[in-house]
Image (cartoon, helix red, strand yellow):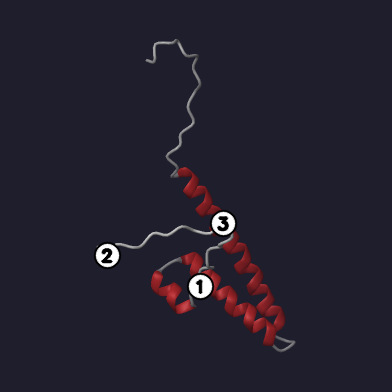
């Protein structure tokens, strides 16, 4: 395995934003959230250039995708919290023995 060089990070340095996947890349990756986000970008781009009679359709689809994306992101946050290694413990008075 090749070693990667480590370096100090400047305090004002920001991580580069992750490039969103195209629809094809998202489908190939099998990530449902990435697929919906790619579809949302397509609908948003289409909405900007759509004719007057098709704008409501694109807008409706965009709203549906926004709701589905919110649900999936919320599910993932909940799932990630469930996978946490931190467990709530009941507090007990310390008896001084360490056992």
- Per the image, the residue denoted by label 1 is 19
SS category of the residue bearing label 3: loop
- Looking at the image, residue 16 lies above or below residue 24: above
Numbered tag placed on residue 2 in the rendering: 2
Q: Are there few (<14), some (14-19), or many (20+) residues within 10 Å of tag 1?
A: few
Q: Secondary structure at mark 1?
A: loop
Instruction: Work out which residue is located at the far right of the displayed protein and give it.
Output: 52
Measuring from the top left, give residue 6's x and y in whole percent.
39, 59
Mark 1 or mark 2, which is nearer the start of the sequence? Answer: 2
Q: Position of residue 51 (x, y in %)?
A: 71, 89
Question: Can you tell which quarter of the image residue 60 is in?
Answer: bottom right
Query: Farthest left residue?
Result: 1
Question: Could you say whether the residue bearing mark 2 is in a helix, strand or loop?
Answer: loop
Q: Residue 12 in the image: state x and y as whole percent.
A: 59, 60
Please report the residue visible at 57 percent of the width from the left and 63 percent of the height from the top.
Answer: 69
Viewport quadrant of the C terminus: top left
């Amino acid at each position: 395995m090749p070693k990667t060089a480590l370096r100090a990070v400047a305090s004002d340095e920001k991580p580069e934003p992750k490039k969103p996947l195209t629809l094809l890349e998202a489908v190939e990756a099998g990530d449902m959230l990435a697929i919906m986000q790619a579809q949302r970008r397509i609908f948003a781009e289409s909405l900007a250039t759509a004719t007057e009679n098709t704008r409501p359709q694109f807008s409706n689809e965009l709203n549906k995708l926004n709701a589905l994306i919110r649900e999936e992101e919320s599910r993932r946050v909940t799932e990630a919290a469930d996978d946490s290694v931190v467990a709530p413990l009941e507090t007990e008075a310390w008896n001084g023995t360490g056992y």
